[in-house]
Image (cartoon, rainbow, N blue to C red):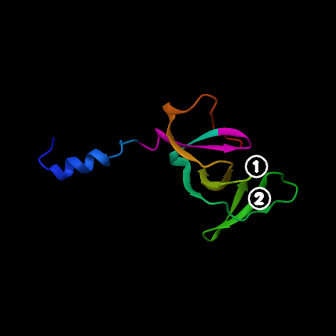
Amino acid sequence: MSDSAARDAIMRFFPEPPDYSTHELGILFRFQGRRLFVDAHRVVEITPPVPTSPLPGEAGRGVAFWRGGAHEVRTGTGPAVAFLLLKTEGREFFVASEENPRALRRKELPVGVEDLPEEL
């Protein structure tokens, strides 16, 4: 109990979120039918699906223009509901998610979830 009844009431209904690091948290999403997890520090932005131009001869890959730049897009087998802009080794690329992405702690992952493969 604090010295303020108002603070106690506010904290009862709106508790402060736990203090997690970006290395504990990540995003769970579906890509090409697989449930994947990516560490939060690799996620630049989550966007609605962005218009994409397919790359000739490259199934599942395209190019999208976002915030003044061209980004590679890796598309899935189903319709995308969101795009995740990810960074790795100094470059950024989009991955299409076939379901709404959600934030989770690594230790709370459901069985069968894989880490985002490096070769994606």
Determine the residue located farthest toward the top in the rendered image. 111
- Which label's residue is closer to the chain start, 2 or 1? 2
- Which mark, by number, is residue 62? 2
- Residue 4 screen position, x and y as percent: 14, 50
Give the residue number, with chain letter if any, for mark 1. Answer: 78
- Residue 33 screen position, x and y as percent: 73, 40
Disc 2 residue type? Gly
Secondary structure of the residue carrying tag 2 is: strand
Prevalent SS, magenta region: strand
Instruction: Give, as a single range, the part of the protein colored magenta.
Output: 21-35
Quarter of the figure with the N terminus: top left
Q: Nearer the viewer, mark 2 or mark 1?
A: 1
Q: Callout 1 environment at 10 Å: few (<14), some (14 to 19), or many (20+)? A: some
Say whether residue 28 is magenta.
Answer: yes
Secondary structure of the residue carrying tag 1 is: loop
Q: Is residue 47 toward the left or the right of residue 24 in the image?
A: right
Disc 1 residue type? Gly
